[in-house]
Amino acid sequence: MTVTTDSRTATFVLGVSGWGVLSPYGLGADEFTAGLRAGRDGTIDAAELTDEPVPDPRAYALAGFRARDHLGRKGTSFLDRRTAFAVLACRQALADSDLVVDDDNRDRIGVVLGTSVGSLQSTSDYSRDTLVQEKPYLVNPILFPNTVLNCAAGQAAIWHGLRGVNATLAGGGMAALAALRYAMTVLGRGRAEALLVGAMEEYTPQMAWAEHAAGRSATTAGGEGGAVFLVEDAAAMRAAGREPVAEILAVDLGHTGGRGDLATALADRIRRVLHQAGVAPEDLATVVTSGSAAEEDALDASVGPDASRVAITDLAGNCATAAGALQVAAVLAHHRGEPGHGDCRSLIVASTADGSVGAAVLKGNGRAARDHR
């Protein structure tokens, strides 16, 4: 199966008007940017997060994070970690933007988040309770909403009073890119004015062991975090006298169907997305990968060695669902508050072991937070 490009959105450009990020470097775009530029080690002792055994004693995680410290006590007692991340990152993105949410536009502003299985911790704990609690299976019903796939997107919309499109895309390692592609379609067809788009991952023993069993974490510790981007029609922003802090020029996804070479399929996808964006390989300043060897081979074949390459796993660990969002955040951090980096083109690439491939082209402009002049 191949995802084709809709002719109505082939030339549609997303403008990023604000963004929020939670990472091992801390909370917010400024902390993330400072951590990247300083080259800080984001690992902590996994024992700070869980008493259960895990395959790696290290974790790329947010030490000491408690939802109520950032969102208040009201309504946070039963939020799972991933949902709290989403609510907070959406708040950061709105605060980073010059777009004001009010009763005139809240019906046209929505939330689109990528995921794999929602909160694996919540689902696992709830399922276990159905087996070990006293009959008649006295599970806590208040915790059930956390097991639903679209819990984070729904809660983010409720917290911020947004009544527009609300969607959750289950895409695993492609989740963030799939969410951005979906946003292009929705905005390109005029079904929303702005969308909060991103992906989150929480560190859990369950996910750490799942990645370990699949052989995907032999050299990389588990991670958590995520990012959300407030995206709009870039052309409409400029017509209103507003300048995006970055633009997403093109996004393209595909699947090998389990056949063929992953690197070859990704190389073809990279060439295609560069063509859609009107960008030549030699124009790329930075490439951010999700950390696989196949991606390196694909880049060698399609764009060559000139552009600087960064693997998000080196910065945020193994957090597949959130990797794409953190890759985009890494590009935006490179441009943030750096006028000399304006107009640079960057490439995001991603792949999964089951044959999914994707790529996106971004352009930054070096503006700082809330500076849209």
Image: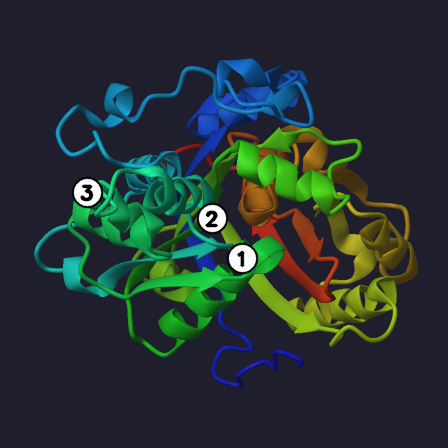
Tell me if mark 1 has few (under 14), some (14-19) or many (20+) residues whose alpha carbon lies within 10 angstroms of its own: many
- Furthest-front residue in view? 135
Mark 2 and mark 1: span between their CA atoms? 7 Å
Residue 199's label in the rendered image is: 2
Instruction: Give yes or no for contact between labels 2 and 1 (Cβ–Cβ under 8 Å).
Output: yes
Check if mark 1's residue and mark 3's residue have beta carbons within 8 Å.
no
Whichever of callouts 1 and 3 sits on the residue coming sooner in the sequence is 3
From the image, tell me which residue sits under label 3. 142
Q: Amino acid at mark 2?
A: Ala
Does residue 160 appear left or right of residue 80 in this picture? Answer: left
Indicate the quadrant where residue 111 lies: bottom left
Alpha carbons under labels 1 and 3: distance apart? 27 Å
Total count of labels? 3
Q: CA distance from mark 2 to mark 3?
A: 24 Å
Q: Earlier in the sequence, mark 2 or mark 1?
A: 1
Residue 304 x, y percent position in the rendering? 90, 53
Question: What residue is shown with label 1?
Answer: 175
Left or right: where 52 falls relative to 162 = right
Closer-to-camera residue (367/86): 86
Give residue 324's mark: none
Give percent across and percent down for residue 122.
38, 42
Residue lying furthest bottom in this view?
A: 7
Residue 163 vs residue 19: left or right?
Answer: left
In terms of secondary structure, where does tag 1 sit?
A: helix
As helix, strand or loop, the secondary structure at mark 2 comes to: strand
